[in-house]
Image (cartoon, rainbow, N blue to C red):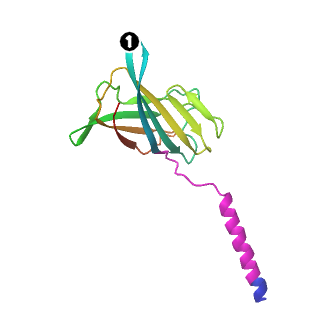
Amino acid sequence: MKRASFNLIIVMAIHLLSCQKDREIYYPIEPGLEFKSIGISNVMLDETGEYLFADLILYYTDGDSNLFRNTSDTTYNCLATLYIKNNSNYELAPNSGNPRSYWIKGIEEQRHTYEQGPITVKTGTWYTGELQLKLYYLVHPFNIGDTIKYSVQVIDNDGNRSNIAEMEKIYSD
């Protein structure tokens, strides 16, 4: 009897552990953002001069997978803001169009890349993926050696706001 009870406990423990592998990872219903990288480059586009491009790459999570707007809703749901460090304080960058607002359109597939103008969405699962924002500036809003900071926030279809993801970079040519 003791041996049968022991075997039953072992079988139940193995079953519970195997079920753990199949469970979805839980994410909060509020979207979450985490910066991966910032890249800045100067590009000569035409005879009018040089443009400055900033590539912001962030990881996102969303527990109820409703971060992306359907095609009939054109409400902005992504805000990107640029700051420049002046002494020890950050100030909104001049000539930068702060904050910049974007519309992240609906997605239909997991593990797919969606090109949406200045935003590229690379979905992992229905709940995770990567956002790439491509910002351009006709007038350089900062100079070589400036410490800049970008902040990004997204809003899901229920009005839940993500954390404000921030990342610093020292601008060099």
Q: Position of residue 145 (x, y in %)?
A: 28, 35
Residue identified by numbered label 1: 48
Q: Position of residue 85 (x, y in %)?
A: 26, 38
- Quadrant of residue 2 within the rendered picture: bottom right
Is any atom of residue 41 visible in this view?
Answer: yes
Question: From this viewpoint, which residue is outermost toward the front?
Answer: 173
The magenta-colored residue range is 6-33
Is any atom of residue 161 visible in this view?
Answer: no
- Residue, x 57% and y 54% (percent of image)? 26
- Is disc 1 placed on a helix, strand or loop? loop
- State the quadrant of the C terminus: top left
State left or right for residue 107 relative to residue 99. Answer: right
Q: Position of residue 96 (x, y in %)?
A: 34, 26
Magenta stretch: dominant secondary structure: helix
Residue in front for this viewpoint, 82 or 41: 41
The question of residue 109 being in magenta is answered with no
